[in-house]
Image (cartoon, grey):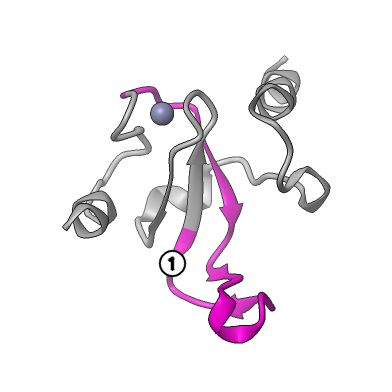
């Protein structure tokens, strides 16, 4: 299964485009439809690739080292996400 293959990735690298600009969308939890989209704590975090917007869930240790998307930027466009990411590097 695709989902399981993604979860075993050890390094912060996008499985789809191969780039390493990965950020955390939801740190150690989720907002699933099962709980009415309220935050639910979990071992898994959701991370997203800044370059292709592929997202996946992982409990790899690298998550703690990645930048976290501020809540007010959830749901923004890819260009806005890239702008934010690049602004925090500079
Ligand atoms: Zn990617």
Q: Secondary structure at mark 1?
A: loop
Q: Nearer the viewer, residue 40 or 35?
A: 35
Q: What residue is rendered at 49% in x and 48% in y? A: 47
Q: Which residues are magenta?
A: 18-45
Q: Identify which residue is drawn at 69% across, 78% down.
A: 38
Relative to 61, residue 54 above or below: above
Check residue 26 for magenta coloring: yes
Q: Residue at x 56, y 73 (%)?
A: 32
Asked if residue 44 lies in the magenta stretch, the reply is yes
The residue lying at 35 percent from left, 56 percent from top is 60
Q: Residues within 10 Å of mark 1 (few under 14, many from 20)?
A: some
Q: Viewed as shown, does residue 47 lie left or right of 26? A: left
In which quadrant of the rendered view does residue 50 lie? Answer: top right
Farthest right residue in view:
72
Quadrant where the N terminus is found in the figure: bottom left
In-front residue for pair 22/31: 31
The quadrant where ligand 1 appears is top left
State the image coordinates of residue 11 (x, y, percent, origin top left).
Answer: 30, 39
Residue highlighted by disc 1: 44
């Amino acid at each position: 299964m695709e989902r399981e293959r993604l979860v075993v990735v050890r390094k912060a690298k996008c499985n789809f485009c191969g780039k390493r600009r990965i950020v955390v969308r939801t740190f150690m939890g989720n907002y699933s439809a099962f709980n009415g989209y309220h935050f639910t704590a979990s071992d898994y975090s959701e991370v997203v690739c800044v370059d292709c917007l592929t997202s996946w869930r992982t409990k790899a240790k690298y998550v703690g080292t990645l930048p976290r998307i501020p809540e007010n930027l959830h749901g923004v466009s890819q260009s806005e996400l890239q702008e934010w990411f690049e602004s925090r590097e500079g």
